[in-house]
Image (cartoon, helix red, strand yellow):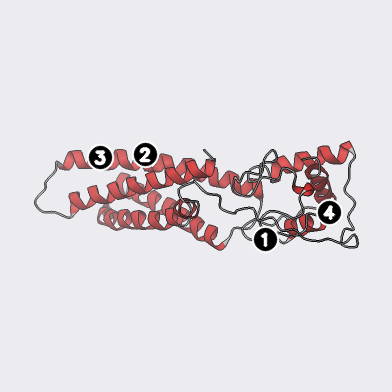
Amino acid sequence: MSLFFLKSILSIVMLVFALIAMFTMFEIFGKSDKKYSIEKLKRLHKVNGIVYLLIYIFIAYFCLSFIIDTKGELSPRGTFHSIFALTIIVLLGLKISIVRIYRQFYNQVKILGLLIALITFGMVGTSGGYYLLVTKFGTEKIDRARYYKNEVSSEEVKTVIRIDEASIKKGKKLYESKCYLCHDPYSTKTIVGPGLMGILKNPSLPVSGKPAIPESIINQLRNPYRYMPSFSYLSEEEMLNIIAYLNTL
């Protein structure tokens, strides 16, 4: 089970807790004839909120770690997801402050609770929901590797692949800090992106189908195809070291 699949499942669980919170809120404030005990509903709402917050913190930690490790710009979908997530934590902070301290604004708690539940739909839909949808609940890869037989002339290959141990060692270190989270170096299985075992021994790159030559990899790092973040901040020296390591896979 990949971390992304686990995160997606947890986000669905968090959405369920948001729905439970909304239900208990409606039962407490929305009915004159109470079917359930108010005290029990309040306790359920409180416990539900604590679990929701714990799941939120875990997922947020995972997402922030991913962003820090990749150091790439967010995609439009990722940007919306982040905005939803930040909005939720702000609203949660306001709600807790009102309930605990500023009780003169207590009537606003209902609106805040409803907003949190609705925004949770958006947050989950743009991340976990999307992942589960496009992978058919984790049974398929996001990006199927597509290998095309491209004829590459010797004139196109201008970059000499380094084979010295120092370059390979530096490249491995860079790979582990920049690439490993998304690309498995020991297989062709997809984590987030395709596994890169034998990447320079194939006729073409996975997903983009471009020739499997150093120039294509450098271009991919600078101007990524599809969803991969840009690594244009890496120096040419660092890119060549990464290629040296990729050549050993």
Distance of label 4 from label 1 (alpha carbons):
19 Å
Question: What distance separates the C-alpha of mark 2 from that of mark 1?
Answer: 38 Å
Mark 1 or mark 4, which is nearer the start of the sequence? 1
What amino acid does circle 1 point to? Tyr
Which residue position holds label 2?
A: 51
Observer able to see residue 27: yes
The front one of 174 and 45 is 174
Is there a contact, CB below 8 Å, between mark 4 and mark 1?
no
The residue positioned 88% from the left and 36% from the top of the image is 165
Tell me the distance, in whole angstroms, between the alpha carbons under discs 3 and 4: 57 Å
Foreground label between 3 and 4: 4
Tell me the element at label 4.
helix
Residue occupying image coordinates x 19% and y 53%:
29
x, y (%) of residue 176?
A: 71, 40
Q: Is residue 195 above or below residue 210?
A: above
The mark that comes first in sequence, 3 or 1, is 3
Secondary structure under the numbered disc 2 in the rendered image: helix
Residue indicated by mark 4: 236
Please provide percent x and percent y for residue 11.
43, 46
Q: CA distance from mark 3 to mark 1?
A: 47 Å
Which numbered mark, 3 or 1, is in the foreground of this view? Answer: 1
Query: Is disc 2 in contact with disc 4, using a CB cutoff of under 8 Å?
Result: no
